């Protein structure tokens, strides 16, 4: 019940905002409503957290109602540790995004109400998709997130509607994702056929996991689901919609798109692909791991070559999504827990990056890196936040993404040394794309055109502080999140019949070293 | 019997040719009405020939639709005329960019 | 008591964070907080070290686990710290030299408006470096490892308005990251192989892991060490790093951070002991770097870069010693400590000279400064005597032992190390002559003057340590102290008695000094650097840092840049082009279908009639047939 409420609050808030008369001049009531709705959602998500039993790997707080009896669709929601992590990511990011988007310059300045309403709609639908435990419900919500995002990009995005402008980006985004959704729809229909042949048709996750399928059917259905998720999470070579969409979006939209909605893709891989089609996932894993490694290196190299800051961040995300997917399809509990944690951390670090660069772009009036220079001198706080967000993106130890990236790599290494070794190249390339960007925009003599870039305002600092605190805090104390993730991951890993390879030369000493004599001591 | 059918055929042909060759929307419209009435005539004739009421029911149906169509069609023509000072159908090709 | 060792790290870290967050009002006293934090850490370090000495030899490895850092699946990492004989020495070196450099920086950075931030970064560096040496787990070590990398990045690029500084900072970070690939993969391999990355557990398991594993681990760790310690082939960043403020060069790029690679090798001695190949690789890297660094040191006219070349070379000595196995570990650490003293001393001395010379780094613009800066000259002179290895100064004891051990390993390695000692004497004498002796060559508007006391006292302290640092070897104290950590060395009998070798080494050193004196006293020194064409090919290569940058540029940077450009093109034209092309073809088809839509009602009607006629005809044909 509480999960339904959690998803319903932002949706109701969005409706309320849509009905609100357009304000003259200021949009204070709209802004206040949007922010407080997102804060209430955050509070409710903490209630969910409080009622969640961390030690249990199954779905909790479930509720199931019959929805469309004709083909066995249910309204069924529930969370396990993985879903809870992503729900919390969504509810934490929503107020940050809304607060940071208060003063976005929209093509139509009267559109603030609708802009904020669509954002709340994204939040509600994403929470719905993360908590859905019915394949049909999940599909509907998965596709429904496209609607608000389409309008957020197409109506409130970049300055132009000309080719390459915001309409182009919005249509490209929509078509790419619709194609994926279509393939998934075919797989959903296929699931119905398979499940109705084995008694009553049902789309419930619990029923679908025990389904018997022929090998070919399973592989085909897996491909249908995976295609949708691979486009959403963008996996090379299905990534080209993301840079365009990110370059044409407002920072808030980009955050919602990359940090939240794209995570439904990787979340879907763990929850739906692996649970429903374990054998097919195993069959496809060499190919997907290869594509993921290509994504990591390719995304990073392309990020180095970008001049538009927003496209740069989009390509870093392609690289990071490569890590997440690599970890999922390495099938070790270490790498999968790392991937799940990575989703959370990447959400935070990318949000900080998009927001802070969005501020830079709106003050400079240009997103081109070459138009900046020496900003550090006039905006030290801004540049400090950019550096910190950048360092988290390049996975500096001590910041949150490092833990997750290292878990992914360490887990992958036990299964495939080449994949891990090539992926590790990503850490050098990450240093390059972040530091080159920082060097060109922030250091050196002040670029005359950048002289108008003022430092962060209190409102912006307030929006960024929670993200920064979490990035630093989870770098040293990732355990609270991992504790929630671990049992759920163990359940998935045992369901697909995989496990961590045992150490080849196990040590007898697992506890720390207090009483361990160094081996040379006996020598004399 | 054949005469009715022949008359219906002739009326229909006149109507069809009118629709195809005339540019004035009113005339085109009247030609459409002519075609409808030609079919009505054929319906009634066949109804009589077969001895059941199906054809007559259809004829009534056509009349009702025709009446509705007249209302909508004429109002469109009037508003086009008001806006463009012409009733030529060739000028009203705005949907083609 | 040892439970408090986390405070060693926490104090400077908290101070650094405080200074970064606290606003402008702390500008007046921020540097004092930073210095006090470092000093507090030093005091605590001394107390802990004394306690450690008070323990039995078997209980001198004190471990503390603060909390579980990461625990998932089979991956378990404790935030654990170990204070033992080795890390204890490092703690003293880092906090001791660190505090002196903090004090010095109060004066050196006195006129910089961002001094508070400078001290914040220095504090963060000290915290990260202590994390590195105290770590009880390789992943925690990696945390410190990257932490010092970050501090180094921030401090090299401290004067961000200079594009060269920003570029040097980035280069240092990126080159270090290349080394970090090795570190990261080594830790992954440990995890896959042993199921843990706790240092003690890995140490215990390494001998039983098989030769291929230990060799791989050793080589990967060596790659990491090469990056951090500026060893060939990842040496190129160190000379550029001299763009940073001089105290940074002294603390990070001479005394502490760059020696982290040596620490890593010594700390991982169980792995290197188990792999002959890895140890040989360490020796080769050390020997090549020691000669390359010395070569570069001979040719540079920039005082900081000459010293940086010398740093490379001296770390090469340490690496070489570490590669010798148990015979050399203790001497590597010993040389590391004495080097920390005398090189920090000389860098700060160079900073003092620059302070008096309006930040000019060109040695050819100096000359005859001994009278203008007597304290700097005296302290620098002590450092000079120490580095070239004149008895009884610190460097003599440590370098002598390394060369002796090198001869014990292999004649050629020993000869290489001996040659290095001679070249060291040559370039350091050259540096002394150009800077302090010879005639004055500075312009008349420059007024060299001695630095303020806050800068000279640290110099005096470090000079004293450079002079007497050799006492650590008294009664073989340091070798016995470190023995539980690095293992016992069987004594090699050399072909000649040790004392003869010492005499030979000293003779070679004197030869280097005489050569430099003859070379630079013979004629007046040009006030400008001679053109490349007028100097020997050796000098030219040295000036260009043995073309290391050019090699990197050709082999790595340019191909990467081309690859990136190609991929950007490919992404736009190839992948995106394929998709948008598909969409365009669809559009073209629609355009074709659009043609018949003329907009004329009559033509539509005609089409309809035509269609009806066709249907009717078809029906008729079907019916009649």
Image (cartoon, rainbow, N blue to C red):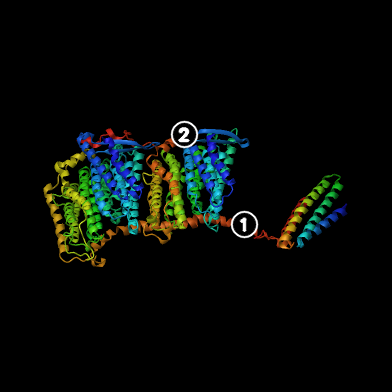
According to the picture, the residue beneath numbered tag 1 turns out to be C590
User: Residue at coordinates 33% horizontally, 58% vertically from top-left?
Assistant: C164
According to the picture, the residue beneath numbered tag 2 turns out to be A50
Residue C305 relative to residue A23: left or right: left
Residue B83 occupies which quadrant of the picture?
bottom right
Question: Would residue C521 be seen by someone viewing this image from the given angle?
Answer: yes
User: What's the distance in space between the residues labelled 1 and 2, CA to CA?
Assistant: 56 Å
From this view, report whether residue C229 is shown above or below residue A508: below
Question: Would residue C146 be seen by someone viewing this image from the given angle?
Answer: no
Disc 1 residue crowd, few under 14, some 14–19, many 20+, Cα 10 Å: few
Front residue (pair C560, A197): C560
Write down the chain letter for disc 2.
A
- For the N terminus of chain C, the quadrant is top left
Front residue (pair A316, C441): C441
Residue B51 relative to residue A80: left or right: right
Write down the chain letter for disc 1.
C
Estimate the x, y position of residue A464 in percent, counting from the top left.
43, 47
Across the whole image, how many numbered discs are drawn on residues?
Answer: 2
Disc 2 residue crowd, few under 14, some 14–19, many 20+, Cα 10 Å: few
Determine whether the residue tagged by mark 1 lies in a helix, strand or loop.
Answer: helix
Report whether mark 1 lies on the same chain as mark 2.
Answer: no
């Amino acid at each position: 019940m509480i999960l339904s409420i959690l998803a319903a609050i932002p949706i109701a808030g969005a409706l309320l905002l849509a009905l609100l008369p357009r304000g003259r001049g200021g949009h204070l009531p709209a802004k206040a409503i949007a922010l407080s709705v997102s804060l209430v959602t955050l509070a409710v998500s903490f209630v969910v957290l409080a009622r969640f039993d961390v030690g249990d790997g199954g779905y909790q707080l479930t509720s199931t109602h019959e929805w469309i009896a004709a083909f066995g669709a249910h309204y069924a929601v529930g969370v396990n540790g993985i879903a809870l992590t992503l729900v919390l990511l969504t509810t934490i990011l929503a107020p940050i995004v809304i607060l940071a988007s208060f003063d976005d310059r929209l093509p139509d300045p009267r559109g603030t109400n609708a802009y904020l309403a669509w954002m709340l709609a994204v939040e509600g639908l994403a929470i719905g998709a993360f908590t859905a435990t019915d394949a049909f419900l999940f599909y509907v919500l998965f596709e429904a997130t496209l609607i608000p995002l389409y309008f957020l990009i197409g109506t409130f995005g970049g300055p132009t509607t000309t080719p390459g402008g915001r309409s182009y980006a919005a249509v490209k985004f929509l078509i790419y994702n619709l194609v994926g959704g279509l393939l998934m729809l075919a797989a959903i229909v296929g699931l119905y056929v398979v499940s109705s042949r084995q008694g009553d048709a049902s789309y419930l996750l619990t029923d679908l996991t025990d389904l018997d399928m022929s090998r070919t059917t399973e592989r085909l259905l897996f491909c249908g689901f995976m295609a949708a998720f691979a486009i959403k999470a963008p996996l090379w070579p299905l990534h080209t919609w993301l840079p365009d969409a990110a370059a044409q979006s407002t920072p808030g939209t980009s955050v919602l798109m990359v940090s939240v909605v794209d995570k439904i893709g990787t979340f879907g891989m763990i929850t739906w692909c692996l649970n429903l089609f374990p054998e097919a996932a195993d069959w496809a894993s060499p190919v997907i791991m290869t594509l993921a490694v290509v994504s990591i290196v390719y995304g990073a190299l392309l990020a180095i070559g970008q001049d538009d800051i927003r496209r740069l961040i989009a390509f870093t995300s392609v690289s990071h999504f490569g890590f997440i997917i690599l970890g999922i399809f390495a099938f070790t509990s270490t790498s999968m827990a790392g991937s799940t944690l990575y989703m959370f951390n990447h959400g935070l670090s990318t949000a900080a990056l998009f927001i802070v660069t969005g501020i830079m772009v709106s003050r400079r009036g240009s997103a081109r890196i070459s138009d900046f220079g020496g900003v550090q001198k006039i905006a030290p706080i801004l540049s400090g936040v950019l550096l910190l967000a950048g360092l988290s993106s390049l996975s500096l130890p001590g910041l949150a993404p490092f833990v997750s990236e290292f878990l992914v790599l360490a887990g992958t290494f036990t299964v495939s040394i080449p994949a891990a070794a090539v992926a590790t190249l990503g850490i050098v390339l990450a240093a390059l794309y972040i530091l080159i960007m920082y060097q060109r925009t922030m250091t050196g003599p002040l670029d005359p055109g950048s002289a108008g870039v003022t430092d962060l305002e209190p409102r912006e600092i307030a929006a960024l502080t929670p993200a920064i605190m979490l990035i630093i805090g989870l770098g040293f104390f990732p355990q609270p999140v991992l504790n929630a993730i671990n049992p759920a991951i163990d359940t998935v890993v045992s369901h697909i019949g995989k496990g961590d390879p045992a150490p080849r030369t196990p040590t007898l000493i697992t506890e720390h070293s207090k009483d361990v004599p160094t081996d040379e001591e006996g020598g004399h | 019997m054949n005469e009715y059918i022949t008359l219906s055929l002739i009326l229909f042909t006149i109507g069809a040719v009118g629709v195809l060759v005339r540019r004035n929307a009113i005339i085109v419209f009247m030609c459409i009405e002519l075609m409808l009435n030609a079919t009505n005539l054929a319906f009634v004739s066949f109804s009589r020939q077969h001895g059941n009421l199906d054809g007559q029911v259809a004829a009534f149906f056509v009349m009702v639709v025709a009446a509705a169509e007249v209302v909508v069609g004429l109002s469109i023509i009037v508003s086009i005329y008001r806006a463009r000072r012409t009733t030529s159908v060739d000028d009203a090709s705005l949907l083609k960019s | 008591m040892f439970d408090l060792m986390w405070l060693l790290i926490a104090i400077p870290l908290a101070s650094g964070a405080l200074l970064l967050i606290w606003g402008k009002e702390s500008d007046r006293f921020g540097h004092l907080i930073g210095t006090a934090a470092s000093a507090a850490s030093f005091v605590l370090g001394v107390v802990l070290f004394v306690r450690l000495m008070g323990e039995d030899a078997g209980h001198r490895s004190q471990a503390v686990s603060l909390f579980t850092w990461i625990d998932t699946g089979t991956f378990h990492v404790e935030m654990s710290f170990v204070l033992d004989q080795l890390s204890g020495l490092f703690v003293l070196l880092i906090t001791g030299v660190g505090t002196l450099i903090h004090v010095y920086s109060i004066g050196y950075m006195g006129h910089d408006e961002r001094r508070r931030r400078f001290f914040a970064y220095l504090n963060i560096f000290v915290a990260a470096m202590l994390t590195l040496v105290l770590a009880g787990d390789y992943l925690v070590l990696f945390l410190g490892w990257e932490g010092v990398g970050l501090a180094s990045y921030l401090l090299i690029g401290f004067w961000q308005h200079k594009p060269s500084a920003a570029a040097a900072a980035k280069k240092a970070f990126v080159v270090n990251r290349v080394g970090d690939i090795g570190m990261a993969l080594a830790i992954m391999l440990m995890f896959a192989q042993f199921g843990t990355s706790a240092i003690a557990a890995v140490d215990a398991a390494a001998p039983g892991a098989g030769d291929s594993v230990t060799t791989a681990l050793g080589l990967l760790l060596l790659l990491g060490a090469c990056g951090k310690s500026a060893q060939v082939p990842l040496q190129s960043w160190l000379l550029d790093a001299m763009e940073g403020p001089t105290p940074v060069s002294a603390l990070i790029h001479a005394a502490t951070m760059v020696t982290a690679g040596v620490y890593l090798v010594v700390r991982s001695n169980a792995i290197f002991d188990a792999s002959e190949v890895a140890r040989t690789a360490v020796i080769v890297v050390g020997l090549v770097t020691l000669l390359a660094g010395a070569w570069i040191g001979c040719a540079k006219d920039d005082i900081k870069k000459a010293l940086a070349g010398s740093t490379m070379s001296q770390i090469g000595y340490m690496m070489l010693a570490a590669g010798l196995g148990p015979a050399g570990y203790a001497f590597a650490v010993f040389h590391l400590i004495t080097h920390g003293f005398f090189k920090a001393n000389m860098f700060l001395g160079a900073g003092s000279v620059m302070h008096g010379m309006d930040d000019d780094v060109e040695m050819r613009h100096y000359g005859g400064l001994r009278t203008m800066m007597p304290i700097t000259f005296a302290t620098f002179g002590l450092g000079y005597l120490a580095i070239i290895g004149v008895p009884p100064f610190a460097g003599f004891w440590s370098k002598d032992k390394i060369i002796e051990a090198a001869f014990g390993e292999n004649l050629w390695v020993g000869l290489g190390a001996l040659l290095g000692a001679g070249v060291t004497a040559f370039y350091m004498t050259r540096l002394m002559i150009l800077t302090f002796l010879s005639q004055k060559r500075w312009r008349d508007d420059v007024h060299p003057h001695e630095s303020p006391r806050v800068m000279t006292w640290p110099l005096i302290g470090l000079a004293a340590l450079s002079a007497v640092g050799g006492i650590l070897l008294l009664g073989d104290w340091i070798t016995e102290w470190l023995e539980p950590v690095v293992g016992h060395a069987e004594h090699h009998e050399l072909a000649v008695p040790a004392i003869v070798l010492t005499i030979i080494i000293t003779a070679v050193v004197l030869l280097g000094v005489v050569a430099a004196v003859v070379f630079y006293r013979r004629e007046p020194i040009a006030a400008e650097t001679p053109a490349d064409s007028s100097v020997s090919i050796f000098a030219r290569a040295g000036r260009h840092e043995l073309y290391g940058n050019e090699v990197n540029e050709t082999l790595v940077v340019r191909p990467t840049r081309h690859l990136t450009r190609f991929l950007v093109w490919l992404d736009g034209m190839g992948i995106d082009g394929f998709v948008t092309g598909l969409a365009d073809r669809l559009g073209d088809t629609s355009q074709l279908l659009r043609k018949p839509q003329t907009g004329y009602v009559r033509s539509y009607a005609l089409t309809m009639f035509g269609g009806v006629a066709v249907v009717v005809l078809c029906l008729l044909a079907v019916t009649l047939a």
